[in-house]
Image: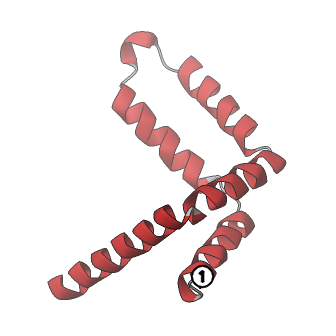
């Protein structure tokens, strides 16, 4: 329902604000970056982008479509164990607010 959607959006926005204001978002981004580097995700995405662009002629490159395609591929390429690690850290942070 619309009320549930509105509530869900408010909860997500509140969580985002808490993550941002506490510095937890930056800490989690660093962990994510490190984990993705460890598994070669960045190189995989660079190779994918190179191949994607090479397979398209310059006059047929639709930049917004290209960005969307790369974004979908990059999100899908994040290994489940890394996704779960970050997700559990977010949940833990939200369920155990710091006493500061």
Residue drawn at point x = 56 percent, y = 27 percent: 52
User: Would you place residue 77 above or below residue 22 in this image?
Assistant: above
Q: Position of residue 70 (x, y in %)?
A: 51, 39
User: Would you place residue 77 above or below residue 94 in this image?
Assistant: above
Residue drawn at point x = 48 percent, y = 62 percent: 20
Question: Of residues 55 and 40, which is closer to you in this image?
Answer: 40
Q: Secondary structure at mark 1?
A: loop
Residue 80 placement, left or right of 24: right
Residue 61 placement, left or right of 81: left
Q: Which residue is mark 1?
A: 98
Residue drawn at point x = 46 percent, y = 71 percent: 18
Q: Residue furthest front?
A: 100
Q: Position of residue 79 (x, y in %)?
A: 71, 60
Q: Could you tell me which quadrant the N terminus lies in?
A: bottom left
Q: Position of residue 38 (x, y in %)?
A: 83, 49
Q: Could you tell me which quadrant the C terminus lies in?
A: bottom right
Question: Of residues 66 and 57, which is closer to you in this image?
Answer: 66
Q: Residues within 10 Å of mark 1 (few under 14, many from 20)?
A: few
Residue 8 placement, left or right of 29: left
User: Would you place residue 9 above or below residue 58 in this image?
Assistant: below
Question: Of residues 99 and 64, which is closer to you in this image?
Answer: 99
């Amino acid at each position: 329902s619309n009320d549930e959607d509105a509530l869900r959006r408010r909860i997500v926005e509140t969580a985002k604000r808490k993550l941002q204001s506490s510095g937890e978002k930056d800490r989690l981004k660093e962990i994510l970056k490190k984990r993705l580097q460890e598994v070669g995700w960045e190189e995989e995405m660079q190779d994918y982008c190179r191949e994607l662009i090479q397979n398209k002629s310059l006059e047929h490159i639709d930049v917004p479509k290209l960005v969307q395609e790369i974004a979908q591929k990059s999100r899908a390429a994040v290994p489940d164990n890394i996704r779960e690690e970050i997700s559990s850290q977010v949940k833990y942070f939200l369920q155990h607010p710091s006493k500061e």
